[in-house]
Image: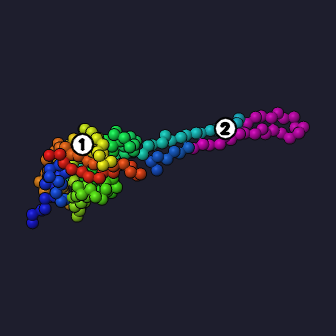
């Protein structure tokens, strides 16, 4: 049975096809004091002090820091593990040219995260429902991860992003987009389809600033 070609062109072709360790222990022992003993009154005896023993013991175990989760990229043996979640830069929260550029770079980081994890919730949150290209990407990624499949590769980098305000109140951001070779794997790790080659392409995003921050209104390729 021939597999459907989910990502024959990926994002930048024509469009993505369907697709108790840290506990601290402190021990302490109380000191024990000796007391004097002697003969009764008038006995003429001399008292002999009993050597006082005041053993003190104090030991503390050095806390062992919990091991930090280590990122492991996906391969034929399984999906990626401990993929770092993209964090929105502070400048991306500002209604400025720099803010638009930083936000759009962040959007593509979230897209890259979705390729590696199959989690498209963040991408949906940052994209307008009217953005057909965005919706298509989300649908393709979800299909590529369906039925126990997973994606290896496909990570995205944005070396250049340049924002220019447009006449309709939104901002146009032109980007250079680098995406690594991508493979969809079946449940047994075998390729679901042929690998998709790495790409170096241009894209343009239309973004707008609202009460909740920047959002992608539209997205397209530069041909």
As drawn, the residue found furthest toward the right would be 42
Give above or below for 102 relative to 133.
above
Crowding at dot 2, Cα within 10 Å, few <14 / some 14-19 / many 20+, comes out as: few
Classify 96 as above or below 74: above
Q: Is residue 223 magenta?
A: no
User: Percent from the top left, x then y, of residue 191?
Assistant: 15, 56
Q: Start and end of the magenta stretch?
A: 27-50
What residue does disc 2 label? 54
Vertically, is 41 above or below 218? above
Which one is in front, 147 or 63? 147
Q: Residue at x 68, y 41 (%)?
A: 32
Q: Which quadrant would residue 43 be assigned to in this image?
A: top right
Question: Where is residue 5 drawn, in percent x and y?
Answer: 13, 59
Give 219 or 138, whichever is nearer the viewer. Answer: 219
Furthest toward the left, the residue is 2
Residue topped by disc 1:
174
* x, y percent for residue 48: 77, 34
> Quarter holding the N terminus?
bottom left
On the question of residue 171 being in view, the answer is yes
96 relative position to 57: left or right: left
Q: Residues within 10 Å of mark 1 (few under 14, many from 20)?
A: many
Q: CA distance from mark 1 to mark 2?
A: 77 Å
Q: Quadrant of residue 180?
A: top left
Q: Secondary structure at mark 2?
A: loop
Q: Residue at x 17, y 42 (%)?
A: 200
Residue 29 falls inside the magenta stretch = yes
- Residue name at image x 45 percent, y 43 percent: 64
């Amino acid at each position: 049975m021939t597999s459907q070609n989910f990502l024959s062109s990926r994002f930048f072709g024509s469009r993505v096809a369907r697709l108790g360790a840290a506990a601290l222990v402190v021990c302490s022992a109380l000191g024990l004091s000796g007391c004097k003993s002697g003969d009764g009154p008038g006995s003429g005896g001399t008292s002999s002090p009993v050597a006082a023993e005041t053993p003190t013991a104090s030991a503390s175990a050095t806390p062992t820091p919990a091991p930090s989760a280590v990122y492991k990229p996906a391969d034929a043996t399984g999906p990626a593990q401990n993929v770092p979640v993209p964090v929105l830069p502070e400048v991306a929260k500002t209604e400025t040219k720099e803010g638009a550029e930083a936000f759009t770079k962040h959007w593509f980081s979230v897209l890259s995260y979705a390729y590696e994890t199959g989690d498209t919730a963040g991408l949906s949150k940052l994209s307008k429902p009217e953005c057909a290209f965005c919706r298509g990407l989300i649908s393709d990624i979800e299909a590529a991860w369906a039925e126990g499949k997973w994606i290896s590769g496909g990570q995205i980098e944005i070396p250049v992003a340049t924002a220019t305000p447009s006449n309709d109140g939104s901002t146009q951001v032109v980007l250079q987009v680098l995406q690594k070779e991508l493979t969809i794997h079946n449940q047994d790790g075998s390729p679901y389809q042929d690998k998709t080659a790495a790409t170096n392409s241009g894209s343009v995003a239309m973004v707008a600033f609202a009460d909740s921050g920047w959002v992608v209104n539209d997205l397209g390729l530069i041909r």
